[in-house]
Image: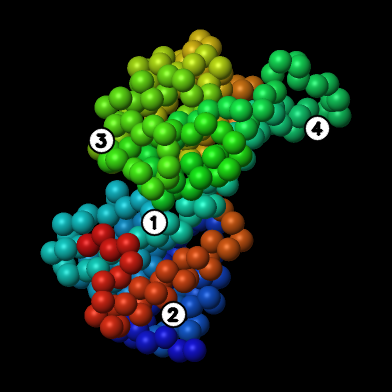
Amino acid sequence: MTVETPFDRLAIVEWGDHPCPPEHLRDLLTDLDCEVVVRDVSDLADCDAAVTVYHHEQFLGSVDWVHTIRSGYEDFPLDAYEAGGITLTNSTGVAGDLVAESALGMMLAQAKGLHHYRDNQGDADWERTHWERPFELGRASVCVVGLGALGSSVATRAAALGMDVWGVDVRPVSALGLDRVYDVSRLEEAVADARFVVLTAPLRESTRGLVGAEALVAMREDAFLVNVSRGEIVEQNALVAALESGEIAGAALDVFATEPLEPESPLWEMDEVIVTPHAAAQSNNYGEKVAELVTNNATCLAADREPWNRIV
């Protein structure tokens, strides 16, 4: 079925090391009635829409619509887009379930100590962890910091496993059925009783450095920090200090303030830290989810309706 769009040519801009190849997304958009091409950002003169990962100055004054396949848009100059009449949409909600599954996997790995066995496998090491180290995830507790689409997905899955779940958000959240939802001003109180603290909040000025020394000290000594949101939400030096001093038991980290994580970072060598390369959203159907959203938005724009996830 051909999908009507208001565009002649939509460019999928080359985006470096993002795991979803732009050519794959192009092949998923063949139903659009415009030409879909993979282009370098310097070659947009004949394009009137673009799908991208990051903002590029070449978009300004060149295209009418930009869609970022991320949920974050902190690098996009919103005032310039608005002044130029450029519609900007993002992919909030596309990766929520995918990242939530990764967060649950990280909690399960920490609860059972699975990462230790994987580390030992290369040495054919049969040694078990100490009998007191593994624990039952279903009898543990989790505080989810940020109850948007991603946090809600984490909370729902954690509850299904039997975990005691509460959250932190800037607004009251009742739909999740959580017994406790704390305002962000009460973060230290919220994390104090949790075995796991999972960060799913968006990066804003108000959340930059949100988890620092005070929050880490407030956590239990047997607690684990899981960050699948943005690295800048955590004060990384404070986290390293908390791990080295035993203020918390460990961490599972998919995101970092500087990426890739510096080779000299002590986080690489810590036994109770799991490091993944900003891959929590990676899945073989990620492109399909983005293509569906792009198609829906093209349809909305063609009908002069409000597109999904409009930022500007």
Give the residue type that dot 2 points to: Val
Name the residue tied to disc 4: 122
Query: In the rendered image, which residue does mark 1 sit on?
Result: 92
Label 3 environment density (alpha carbons within 10 Å; few <14, some 14–19, many ≥20): few
Residue at image position (27%, 27%) is 185
Kind of residue at badge 4: Gly
- Element class at badge 4: loop
Q: Earlier in the sequence, mark 1 or mark 2?
A: 2
* Rendered location of residue 42, percent (x, y): 35, 68
Q: Earlier in the sequence, mark 3 or mark 4?
A: 4
Q: Could you give the CA–CA distance between mark 3 and mark 4, rounded to whole angstroms?
A: 43 Å
Vertical position of residue 263 compared to residue 161: above or below: above
Disc 2: which residue: 36
Amino acid type, callout 1: Thr
Q: Is residue 212 above or below residue 147?
A: above
Provide residue 48's location: percent of width, then percent of height: 30, 78
Q: Residues within 10 Å of mark 1 (few under 14, many from 20)?
A: some
Which residue matches tag 3?
Answer: 206
Residue 255 locus on image (x, y percent): 47, 39
Front residue of 189 and 65: 189
Percent coordinates x, y for residue 7 in the rendering: 32, 83
